Image: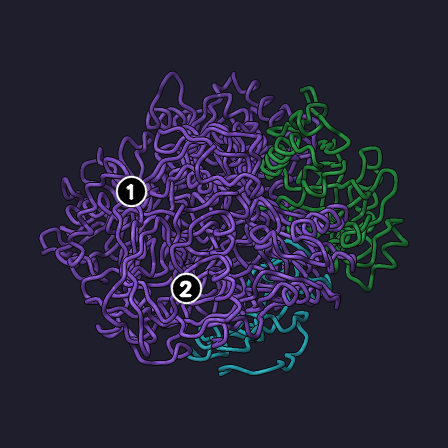
Chain colours: A cyan, B purple, C green
C-alpha cells in the first residue's frame, strides 16, 4: 500500500484513503460544441498510457476529499511528487519514459 | 527416555513430558520440542509420501524451509490443517497429527507404483499427455491424478477458528531474530524509535540457538542471547514478536506479519484468535532473515534419514536429539564438519565424511582425525539404499572431476548433506530490490534496494559471527564491534551438479523434494528448448510447491545453467512472491469475517421490516426489504397483494437508501445546469424535477428527483447504488473544471430517512400529521417540495410518485425514521395500509414505464435510446455529455432502443436478460437484436409486462419478435413502455 | 395538527448496541455510544474565514486536521474549506440560528447533518490499538497528537477521528456503518480481555 502525500493536508497518508482519477492536465474544452468529432474523441478517449513518468490525478477521498495531481513513475510505481489541482505541470525528476 | 535423546543437551524441558499421537500411535516428547524433533527422538523418520512418486520421505530440515515432512495437523473438527511442516509444529500435550498422501498407510502406499513407472512421468508429463480431448481431462485424467498425486486433502468443514488483524507502525522493523537481528535491535532501540523484532520461531535467537558453543563478548552464546533479550524486553520502545512470520514486503515499507497465537496450546480460550495479521508501516526495514542450507543433488537423495547437516545440528543442540546412531556426511562445504563434530561429541558414530572438494582446510581434517572420523576428499555419493530409511550409501572417488569406478558401500542410518548456503533474499525481492549473483557465496545477494531496506547477516552473504553482529549493529545505527569466537566460519564450493558414474536416465536425483522434480526433469526441459529459468520452473514445476523452492531454486538454477551452458547470471532467477511461508486464509481475513466481512447498511426502518417478516435483498451495500410475505405467501402472491393495496388504497415503502446530496450556494442552479441534461434555472423554489445525469460519453449514468428548497439550495436524489459515484463525479467537475462556481456539495443520504406513501389515500393519511404545509392539490401539486413539520419533527416533504399513484416522499431526520413509520402505519390501518418492498416497487414503476438506471440501461444507453429525449434541455449550450450525443455513432440508426414487450401468451413472464431475435426460424447461432431488461407479472393489468432494448425498437412498434428459450420460443409484440394510466390521472386523485 | 408529536421518540441506537465487553474493563477499553448531537457541515471560502469567525463566534480552526473545542461544542477542520461542528443539544438552537444568520450574510454553505453520523467515545489504555485494527494511521501520540482530527478509513467504513486525550478518542461514522465498525470493536475487546500482557 503506497504512502501518498496529500498536498492539501500536507501529510503522507495511506493509499486506502485515496482513489485514482485518471490522467492529469486534460482540461475540458471551454465550448465542446466548437470541437469536431475527431477533436472531441481525442479529448474523450485518448490517453498517454505512459511507460515511466505519468501525470495523473488522485482524490483524497476519505481525507480532505480534494482532487490533486501527482507525478508517478509507472515502471517503479513510485510517486515523485504531488501538487494541488490547478497548479502548473511541474518538471519530473529522473528518467522519463514514453511521455508521448 | 527415548534412545535418540541426549540428556543435558538442548533447550527442551525433560521435566515436562508430553504425549502426542502421530498416525494414531502415541509417543512422548518434551516441552520445547517440535513435532519433528519429538518424532526423531522416537526414531521416526518416515513421515510422509512424496507428491508425485509417493516415495517415502522424512525430514530434510528443522525449520520453515522443510520440503518433505508435511503432515495433517488435527486440532479437532473444523480445525484440521493439511500440509503443515512438522518442523514448525510446537509440541503440546495431546497433539494429534497424521501423515498424508498415502493409502492405506505411510509404510505401504499403493500409489508408490508411480515411482516404479516413473519413466512415464517426466517433466511436462501432464501438459503433454492430458491435452486432449477436453472431456477426458474433466472426467478421467483429472480425478485420477487428484487421487494419486497431491498433498493433503482440503478441510471439509468450515474453519472454526477466528482470526485477528491490525495495522501497526514503527521506525525500524527487523525481520529475523538471529545474531544480526538482535544486534540491530539493541542498537536501534538505543536510539529511541519504535522497534519491532519479529521471528517466525517460538524462541528468538535464530542460528544462535543451534550453536551453544559460540562465545560472544566473553560469554556463551546462549547467555549473551538471554542478556540481550532481557535488555530488549525492558525497553518500552521494543516489541518482540516471536512466532511471527514476515510474510510479505510491499510498497513504501509496508510489511505483512502473521503472528501465530494459539496453535501451540492444548486448549486455548475460545475467544482467542488463532492468528493475527499485522499490517506494519516501517520507517526502515532491516532484513536479517539468515540463510538456508542447500541439499546436494545425487541419486536417491530423498530417503528418510537424509537431511541437511545444519538441521541435524539443530536437532542435537537445540532439542537434544540425535538423528541417528551411525551417521554419514556428504558435503562440499565446511559447515557440515561442525555438525559432524557436534554429533561425534554426543557419542554418535560418524561413519564417514565424504567431501566433494579436493582441498579441505587442514584444521578440519585435524579435528576429524582427533575424533577418529574418516574423511574422504574428492569423493561422491553415487547412490543410497534402504526402503523406509537410508541403510547404506555408495561412495566413489573422483579424479579431475571424473568419477572413478569401484564403489565402496558405507552402512549408515542417516546422511547429513551440505551444498553450501542460500541467503534468504525473499523479502528483499518482494520489495523489488535488485539481486546480483555472487560467485563467492554461489548465490544471489541483495544489491540495490528499492525501499528503505538494509540486509544484514547471512541473508546479505555475510558469514562469521562477529561480522554478522557488527553488520546488524550498524544497521541499527551504532558502530560497535563484537568479540566472538565460534567453532567455524566456513567456506565451501558450489558444485553445479554432483558428478555420478550411473546411467543418468535411470536414477532419480531430487532437486525439488516437495514437487518431486529431479535433475533429469530440468535437463529434459532444457533439451526441449526452455531457456529462461522462469519457463523451466513452470515446465518442471520446480520451486512451485508450498515451500516456493527454498531448498531447490539454486540447485535447479545451477543444473539449468550447466545444461544451457550459460553463466547463471544469464539464466536469471525466478521471482519470489509473498507469502514467505504458507499462510492461512483466516489470517488474511483477520477480523474481517462474519458481521465484519462487509458493511451491511441498514435504514432506520430496517429493524421494523425484520420484525415484520420482510424478505431482504442486497442493493449495493444496503439490504432492502424485498417483500413482506403474510401467512407463508410466496413472493408473487405477496407482490400481487402489495401492489393491489398500493393501487387501490395505500402502500408504505422505505426509500431511505436513495442517495441524497444537498447542493448549496449562489451558483447551485448553474452547477446543476452543467451537470444534468435538464434545465434548472427556471425551476421555482418549492418545485422539483426529474434529473438525468450522463457521463461525458453521453450515456445515462444516474437519475433522480431534484427539489429546489430555496434559490441557493437543492436537494438532489440519486439511485441507491449510484450515490457515492455521483457525488465523486460532481466534486470532480466542481473542483477541477469549474472551481470558480460558488457552490458546495454535502452528502445527506444518511441524514434523512425517507418514507414513501403511494396510493389514492396517501394524502388522507398524512394530512392530520403535517404542520406548516398546505397539502391541497393546488397548493401542493405533483412535483412539489416543501419544508415543514410532521408529527412535530422537521420534514422535507416531496410530492413525487414512482408508482403512478398519488405519492409523497417524507424525509425526516434519520433517527426519527422508525418512530414516524410506526405512527403512520398505525394511523394507516383505517386504509388497510400495506408495507411493500423493492419487488412491488419495481412492478409499479415498470407498469408506468419508469426506468431503473443500471437495469434498463447498461452504460451504453443514451437518453434517446431510452426514449427520454424530453429530459434534455434543448436550449442549454452545454452539459456533461451533450457534445457526445452528437457523435456519429450516437446518432446513427440501428441503436438499441427501449420498448415495451407484450408476450402473445399473457401468462408468460419473460426472463430478464433473455435474448430477442427477429426471425425464429433462422439457423443457430441466431442474430440477436436485443434483450429483455425488465419483466414482471402485473396483477393490475392481469398479464405479464416487460421492457427490452431492441435494435431500432421504436420503428418496430406493433411487430412481433421472438424470445428463444430452452423449452420453447416465446412470441412477443413490441409496444410502448407505459402500460398503466398513460394520462397520469391517478396522480391527482382526491 | 391533530396528532401527538413524536419528538421524544428519537432512537439513535437502531441496530447498534454496545456489547458488555466494550465497557467491562474501562481502564483498558471503554466504548460508549454518544447521545444525540446537533451537527453541521460548514463550507467557507478562505477569504471569508476571518469575517465568518467574527460574525459567528465559531472558532473555525485554520489548518486541515486541527480542531477546537468548548465544553459543549467541537469544531473539526476536515478540508481546505470544510468544517464539521458537533454541538450538545443545549447548544443546538443557537447553532441553528448562527448557521442561518451567516448563510444570509456570506457566500457559504451550512448543511444540517445531525442524524447522518453516529458517534462513539473511546477511552482506555488500549483504544489506540482498538482503532488501529481497522484504521491505518499512526496513532502514536507524537504522530497523532491531542486535538488532531481527520477523516480517514476504518476497514471498509469512512470515519472521522478526533483525539481528545492521550487515551481518549472521539469517532464518528455514517449511521449505517456504525454497527459494522462496532463489530470490530467487539471482536478486539473479546480477544484482548484474555491478554494478560496488556
The correct choice, above or below, for B891 with respect to B151 in the image is: below
- Left or right, residue A21 beside residue B309: right
Q: Answer with left or right where residue C131 lies relative to residue A19.
A: right
Numbered disc in front, either 1 or 2? 2
Q: Is residue B981 left or right of residue C7?
A: left
Residue B950, image x, y percentages: 27, 55
Identify the chain of the residue marked 2, using the numbered disc in the image.
B
Callout count? 2
Identified at 38% across, 41% down, the residue is B71
Label 1: which residue? Answer: B101
Which numbered disc flags the more N-terminal residue, 1 or 2?
A: 1
Secondary structure type for disc 2: strand
Q: Give the chain of mark 1.
A: B
Position of B332 relative to C92 (above/below): below
Mark 1–mark 2 Cα distance, whole angstroms, equals 38 Å
B567 or C182, which lies in front?
B567
Residue at 58% from the left image edge and 46% from the top image edge: C155
User: Which residue is disc 2 drawn over?
Assistant: B375
Instruction: Point out residue B852 in the picture as x, y percentages from the top left corner.
Output: 42, 46
x and y percent of residue B14 in the render?
A: 55, 33
Residue B770 appears in view: no
Amino acid at each position: 500500500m503506497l504512502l501518498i502525500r496529500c498536498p492539501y493536508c500536507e501529510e503522507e497518508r495511506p493509499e486506502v484513503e485515496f482513489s485514482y482519477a485518471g490522467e492529469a492536465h486534460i482540461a475540458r474544452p471551454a465550448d465542446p460544441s466548437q470541437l469536431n468529432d475527431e477533436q472531441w474523441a481525442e479529448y474523450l478517449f485518448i490517453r498517454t498510457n505512459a511507460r515511466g513518468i505519468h501525470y495523473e490525478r488522485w482524490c483524497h477521498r476519505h481525507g480532505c476529499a480534494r482532487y490533486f495531481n501527482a507525478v508517478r513513475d509507472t515502471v517503479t510505481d513510485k510517486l515523485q511528487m504531488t501538487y494541488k489541482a490547478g497548479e502548473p505541470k511541474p518538471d519530473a525528476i529522473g528518467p522519463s519514459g514514453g511521455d508521448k | 527416555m527415548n534412545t535418540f535423546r541426549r540428556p543435558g543437551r538442548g533447550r527442551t524441558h525433560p521435566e515436562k513430558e508430553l504425549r502426542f499421537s502421530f498416525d494414531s500411535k502415541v509417543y512422548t516428547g518434551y516441552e520445547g520440542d517440535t513435532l519433528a524433533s519429538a518424532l526423531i527422538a522416537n526414531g521416526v523418520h518416515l513421515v510422509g509420501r512424496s507428491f508425485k512418486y509417493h516415495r517415502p520421505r522424512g525430514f530434510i530440515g528443522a525449520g520453515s524451509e522443510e520440503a518433505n515432512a508435511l503432515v495433517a495437523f488435527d486440532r479437532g473438527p473444523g480445525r484440521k490443517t493439511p500440509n503443515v511442516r512438522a518442523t514448525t509444529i510446537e509440541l503440546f500435550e495431546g497433539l494429534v497429527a497424521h501423515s498424508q498422501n498415502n493409502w492405506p498407510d505411510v509404510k505401504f502406499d499403493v500409489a508408490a507404483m508411480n515411482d516404479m513407472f516413473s519413466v512415464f512421468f517426466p517433466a511436462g508429463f501432464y501438459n503433454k499427455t492430458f491435452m486432449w480431448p477436453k472431456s477426458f481431462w474433466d472426467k478421467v485424467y483429472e480425478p485420477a491424478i487428484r487421487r494419486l498425486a497431491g498433498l493433503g486433502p482440503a478441510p471439509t468443514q468450515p474453519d472454526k477458528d477466528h482470526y485477528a488483524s491490525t495495522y501497526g507502525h514503527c521506525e525500524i522493523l527487523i525481520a529475523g531474530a538471529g545474531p544480526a537481528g538482535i544486534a540491530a535491535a539493541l542498537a536501534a532501540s538505543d536510539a529511541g524509535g519504535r522497534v519491532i523484532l519479529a521471528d517466525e520461531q517460538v524462541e528468538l535467537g535464530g542460528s544462535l540457538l543451534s550453536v551453544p558453543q559460540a562465545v560472544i563478548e566473553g560469554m556463551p552464546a546462549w547467555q549473551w542471547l538471554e542478556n540481550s533479550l532481557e535488555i530488549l524486553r525492558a525497553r518500552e520502545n521494543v516489541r518482540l514478536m516471536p512466532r511471527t512470520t514476515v510474510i510479505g514486503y510491499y510498497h513504501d515499507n509496508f510489511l505483512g506479519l502473521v503472528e501465530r497465537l494459539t496453535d501451540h496450546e492444548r486448549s486455548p480460550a475460545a475467544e482467542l484468535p488463532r492468528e493475527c495479521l499485522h499490517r506494519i508501516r516501517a520507517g526502515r526495514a532491516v532484513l536479517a532473515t539468515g540463510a538456508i542450507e542447500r541439499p546436494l543433488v545425487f541419486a536417491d537423495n530423498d530417503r528418510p534419514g537424509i537431511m541437511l547437516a545444519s538441521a541435524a545440528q539443530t536437532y542435537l543442540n537445540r532439542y537434544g536429539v540425535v538423528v541417528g546412531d551411525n551417521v554419514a556426511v556428504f558435503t562440499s562445504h565446511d559447515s557440515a564438519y561442525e555438525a559432524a563434530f557436534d554429533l561425534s561429541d554426543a557419542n554418535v558414530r560418524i561413519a564417514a565424511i565424504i567431501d566433494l572438494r579436493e582441498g579441505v582446510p587442514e584444521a578440519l581434517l585435524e579435528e576429524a582425525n582427533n575424533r577418529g572420523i574418516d574423511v574422504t576428499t574428492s569423493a561422491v555419493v553415487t547412490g543410497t539404499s534402504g526402503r523406509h530409511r537410508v541403510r547404506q550409501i555408495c561412495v566413489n572417488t573422483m579424479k579431475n572431476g571424473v568419477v572413478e569406478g569401484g564403489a565402496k558401500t558405507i552402512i549408515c542410518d542417516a546422511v547429513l548433506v551440505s551444498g553450501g548456503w542460500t541467503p534468504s533474499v525473499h523479502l528483499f525481492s518482494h520489495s523489488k530490490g535488485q539481486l546480483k549473483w555472487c560467485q563467492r557465496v554461489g548465490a544471489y545477494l541483495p544489491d540495490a534496494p528499492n525501499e528503505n531496506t538494509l540486509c544484514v547477516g547471512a541473508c546479505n552473504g555475510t558469514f562469521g559471527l562477529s561480522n554478522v553482529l557488527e553488520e546488524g549493529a550498524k544497521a541499527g545505527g551504532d558502530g560497535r564491534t563484537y568479540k566472538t569466537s565460534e567453532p567455524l566460519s566456513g567456506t565451501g564450493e558450489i558444485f553445479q551438479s554432483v558428478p555420478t558414474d550411473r546411467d543418468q536416465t535411470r536414477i532419480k536425483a531430487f532437486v525439488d523434494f516437495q514437487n518431486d522434480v529431479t535433475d533429469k526433469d530440468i535437463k529434459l526441459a532444457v533439451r526441449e528448448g526452455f531457456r529462461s529459468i522462469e519457463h523451466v520452473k513452470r515446465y518442471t514445476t520446480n520451486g512451485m510447491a508450498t515451500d516456493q523452492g527454498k531448498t531447490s531454486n539454486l540447485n535447479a538454477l545451477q543444473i539449468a545453467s550447466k545444461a544451457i551452458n550459460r553463466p547463471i547470471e544469464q539464466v536469471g532467477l525466478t521471482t519470489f512472491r509473498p507469502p514467505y511461508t504458507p499462510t492461512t486464509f483466516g489470517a488474511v481475513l483477520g477480523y474481517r469475517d462474519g458481521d465484519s466481512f462487509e458493511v451491511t447498511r441498514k435504514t432506520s426502518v430496517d429493524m421494523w421490516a425484520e420484525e415484520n417478516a420482510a424478505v431482504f435483498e442486497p442493493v449495493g451495500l444496503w439490504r432492502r426489504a424485498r417483500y413482506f410475505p403474510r401467512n407463508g405467501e410466496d413472493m408473487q402472491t405477496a407482490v400481487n397483494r402489495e401492489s393491489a393495496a398500493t393501487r387501490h388504497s395505500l402502500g408504505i415503502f422505505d426509500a431511505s437508501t436513495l442517495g441524497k446530496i444537498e447542493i448549496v450556494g449562489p451558483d447551485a442552479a448553474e452547477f446543476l445546469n452543467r451537470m444534468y441534461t435538464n434545465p434548472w434555472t427556471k425551476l421555482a423554489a418549492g418545485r422539483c424535477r426529474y434529473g438525468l445525469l450522463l457521463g461525458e460519453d453521453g450515456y445515462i449514468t444516474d437519475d433522480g428527483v431534484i427539489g429546489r428548497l430555496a434559490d441557493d439550495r437543492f436537494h438532489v436524489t440519486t439511485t441507491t447504488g449510484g450515490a457515492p459515484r455521483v457525488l465523486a463525479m460532481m466534486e470532480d467537475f466542481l473542483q477541477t473544471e469549474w472551481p470558480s462556481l460558488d457552490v458546495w456539495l454535502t452528502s445527506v443520504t444518511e441524514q434523512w430517512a425517507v418514507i414513501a406513501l403511494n396510493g389514492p389515500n396517501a394524502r388522507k393519511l398524512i394530512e392530520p400529521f403535517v404542520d406548516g404545509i398546505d397539502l391541497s392539490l393546488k397548493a401542493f401539486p405533483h412535483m412539489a417540495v416543501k419544508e415543514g413539520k410532521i408529527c412535530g419533527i422537521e420534514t422535507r416533504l416531496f410530492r413525487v410518485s414512482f408508482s403512478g399513484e398519488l405519492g409523497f416522499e417524507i424525509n425526516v431526520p434519520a433517527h426519527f425514521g422508525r418512530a414516524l413509520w410506526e405512527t403512520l402505519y398505525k394511523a394507516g390501518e383505517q386504509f388497510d395500509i400495506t408495507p411493500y418492498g423493492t419487488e412491488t416497487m419495481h412492478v409499479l414503476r415498470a407498469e408506468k414505464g419508469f426506468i431503473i438506471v443500471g437495469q434498463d440501461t447498461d452504460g451504453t444507453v443514451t437518453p434517446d435510446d431510452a426514449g427520454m429525449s424530453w429530459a434534455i434541455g434543448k436550449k442549454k449550450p452545454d452539459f456533461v455529455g451533450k457534445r457526445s450525443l452528437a457523435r456519429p455513432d450516437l446518432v446513427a440508426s440501428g441503436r438499441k432502443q427501449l420498448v415495451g414487450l407484450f408476450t402473445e401468451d399473457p401468462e408468460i413472464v419473460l426472463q430478464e436478460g433473455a435474448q430477442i431475435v427477429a426471425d425464429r426460424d433462422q439457423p443457430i447461432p441466431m442474430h440477436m437484436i436485443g434483450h429483455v431488461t425488465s419483466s414482471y407479472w402485473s396483477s393490475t393489468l392481469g398479464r405479464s409486462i416487460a421492457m427490452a432494448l431492441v435494435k431500432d425498437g421504436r420503428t418496430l412498434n406493433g411487430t412481433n419478435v421472438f424470445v428463444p428459450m430452452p423449452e420453447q420460443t416465446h412470441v412477443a409484440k413490441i409496444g410502448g413502455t407505459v402500460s398503466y394510466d398513460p394520462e397520469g390521472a391517478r396522480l391527482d386523485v382526491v | 395538527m391533530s396528532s401527538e408529536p413524536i419528538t421524544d421518540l428519537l432512537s439513535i441506537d437502531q441496530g447498534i448496541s454496545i456489547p458488555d465487553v466494550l465497557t467491562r474493563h474501562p481502564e483498558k477499553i471503554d466504548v460508549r455510544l454518544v447521545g444525540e448531537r446537533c451537527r453541521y457541515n460548514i463550507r467557507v471560502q478562505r477569504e471569508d474565514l476571518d469575517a465568518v469567525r467574527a460574525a459567528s463566534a465559531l472558532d473555525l480552526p485554520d489548518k486541515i486536521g486541527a480542531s477546537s473545542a468548548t465544553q459543549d461544542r467541537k469544531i473539526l477542520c476536515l478540508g481546505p474549506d470544510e468544517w464539521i461542528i458537533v454541538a450538545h443539544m443545549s447548544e443546538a438552537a443557537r447553532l441553528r440560528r448562527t448557521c442561518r444568520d451567516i448563510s444570509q450574510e456570506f457566500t457559504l454553505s451550512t448543511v444540517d447533518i445531525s442524524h447522518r453520523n453516529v458517534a462513539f467515545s473511546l477511552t482506555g489504555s488500549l483504544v489506540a490499538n482498538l482503532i488501529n485494527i481497522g484504521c491505518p494511521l499512526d496513532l502514536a501520540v507524537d504522530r497523532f497528537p491531542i486535538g488532531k482530527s481527520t477523516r480517514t478509513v476504518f476497514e471498509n467504513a469512512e470515519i472521522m477521528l478526533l483525539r481528545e486525550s492521550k487515551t481518549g478518542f472521539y469517532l464518528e461514522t455514517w449511521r449505517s456503518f456504525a454497527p459494522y465498525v462496532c463489530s470490530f470493536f467487539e471482536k478486539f475487546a473479546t480477544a484482548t480481555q484474555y491478554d494478560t500482557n496488556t
